[in-house]
Amino acid sequence: MAGGWAKDGAVSEQIEASVSDELARMQARRRPVGESLTHCAECEEPIPEARRAALPGVKLCVDCVAERDAAFQARGGINRRGSKDSQLK
């Protein structure tokens, strides 16, 4: 239940907007395109046929992708739409 100046359902709308924004960001991420490589672009190990068939345009082996994903730093989860400062402007 929202109170004060917020209308009913405002919290749900903020959550839905945050989820929609994150889904759009994830869908906008670059996906591999083109022909798959037979060997990894980083370590030169062979890429299995099953992986090349499952992910068209794949350039890296599973180990190199796992290393790259482990190094990925997620951004902060601050909902700026819900901050009091943004509502005062």
Image: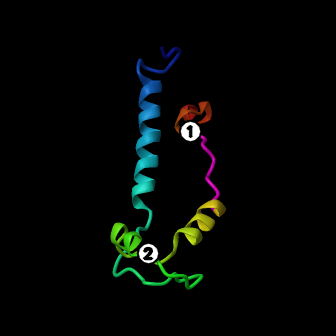
**Mark linked to residue 43:** none
Please, is residue 84 above or below residue 62 in the view? above
Q: Which residue is drawn at 42% across and 48% down?
A: 23
Q: Residue at x 41, y 35 (%)?
A: 16
Tell me residue 75's x, y (percent): 61, 52
Please, is residue 2 above or below residue 48 in the view? above
The residue range painted magenta reads 72-79
Callout 2 amino acid:
Pro
Q: Residue at x 41, y 60 (%)?
A: 28
Disc 1 vs disc 2: which is toward the camera?
A: 2
**Mark linked to residue 79:** 1
Which is nearer the N-term, disc 1 or disc 2? 2
| Residue 32 appears in the rendering | no
Tell me residue 62's x, y (percent): 53, 68
Please, is residue 83 above or below residue 38 in the view? above
38, 32: nearer the viewer: 38
| Residue 53 appears in the rendering | yes
Label 2 sits on residue: 48
Is residue 24 inside the magenta stretch?
Answer: no
* Snapshot quadrant of residue 87: top right
* Snapshot quadrant of residue 48: bottom left
Residues under labels 1 and 2: Cα distance?
41 Å
Label 1: few (<14), some or many (≥20) within 10 Å?
few
Q: Which residue is drawn at 60% across and 30% down?
A: 84
Label 2: few (<14), some or many (≥20) within 10 Å?
some
